Image (cartoon, grey):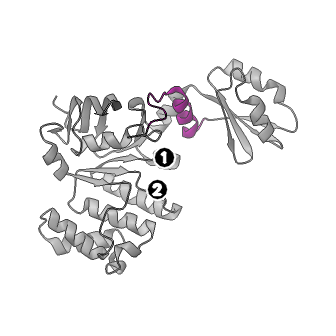
Amino acid sequence: MNAAPDLAVEVEGLTKRFGDKTVVKDLSIRVDAGRITGFLGPNGSGKTTTLRMLCGLLTPDGGRGRCLGLDILADAAAIKRQTGYMTQRFSLYEDLTIEENLDFIARVYGLDRRRPRVAEALERLGLADRRRQLAGALSGGWKQRLALAACVLHQPRLLLLDEPTAGVDPKARREFWDEIHALAAGGMTVMVSTHYMDEAERCHDIAYIAYGRLMARGTAEALIAASGLVTFNVEGPGTDGLQRELAGAPGVEMVAPFGLALHVSGIDRAALEAAIAPYRREPWRWTEAAPTLEDVFIRLMAQSTDDYAGRAAA
């Protein structure tokens, strides 16, 4: 397989098993260079396993493809050298300072201009004033910045982020995403797994994986348009009771509270309107609304099946 020059990733039939559990099943995906692709899906759906296969940390049991123009099977070591990978858990040395951690990473990669590179990373991520602070004393947001600085110190062409903002406050998350977009604008390809819908909407495009299978692919706007969902918004007193009455009614696929309102969604407009017709009266106020990305993914989750429900997720 010869990947097109504007593709950072092109894989076909990617499969990975752990024992008798197949956690990634015949997955095929293309990722354009310089794009930010979001990976979404339930816990245990194979997102992390997919990322690790793409960067050479795991060997696929089936499938083929190329990453950064290199064969994912034959050239795994070369792919690793051109990839930055930020894990879910902070994995740097907590008893070293910020600067010492980055200097250590620079030595591991055998980088030239080690001190200038570290100084540039400190400045870019706003860490210069804290350079002598122990990593273990940092808050979640500052640890995140340090981890990102370590991941991009060797100037990788591909950056893999595995739920990078879990437990981080909204301001730190926004600043983190501003930096991710700046890296992508500079030509870096970014693949990120996340559970946050607002983060998914910040990606250039999205891949939804459920229990090892790729179920949807495209921009947020395209996925919403292709979902076929019809959604009505209802506000007024007693919507909690209304939710119980509408749940499971013919034509109603989802009823989800949003603050004091409910989103009521379905695929069959006529059946949905018939279901809500008895309740389209005072004290409730009904308006048709555009479905959200969250609406789409909740429906995708309802359509997917965990073949190993009850077992530990890989």
Residue 193 drawn above or below residue 277: below
Per the rendering, the mark at residue 239 is: none
Question: Do the CB atoms of the residues marked 2 and 1 lie less than 8 Å apart?
Answer: yes
Determine the image quadrant of residue 296: top right
At a point 42% along the width and 46% down the height, the residue shown is 203
Q: Which residues are magenta?
A: 291-311
Q: Is residue 169 visible?
A: yes
* Quarter that holds the N terminus: top left
* Residue type at numbered disc 2: Ala
Residue 168 drawn above or below residue 113: above
Per the rendering, the mark at residue 166 is: 2
Q: Nearer the viewer, residue 269 or 25?
A: 25
Q: Which residue is mark 1?
A: 195
Q: Disc 2 on helix, strand or loop?
A: loop
* Residue type at numbered disc 1: His
Image check: 91 left or right of 243? left
Could you say where residue 222 lies in the image, as x and y percent from the top left? 47, 32
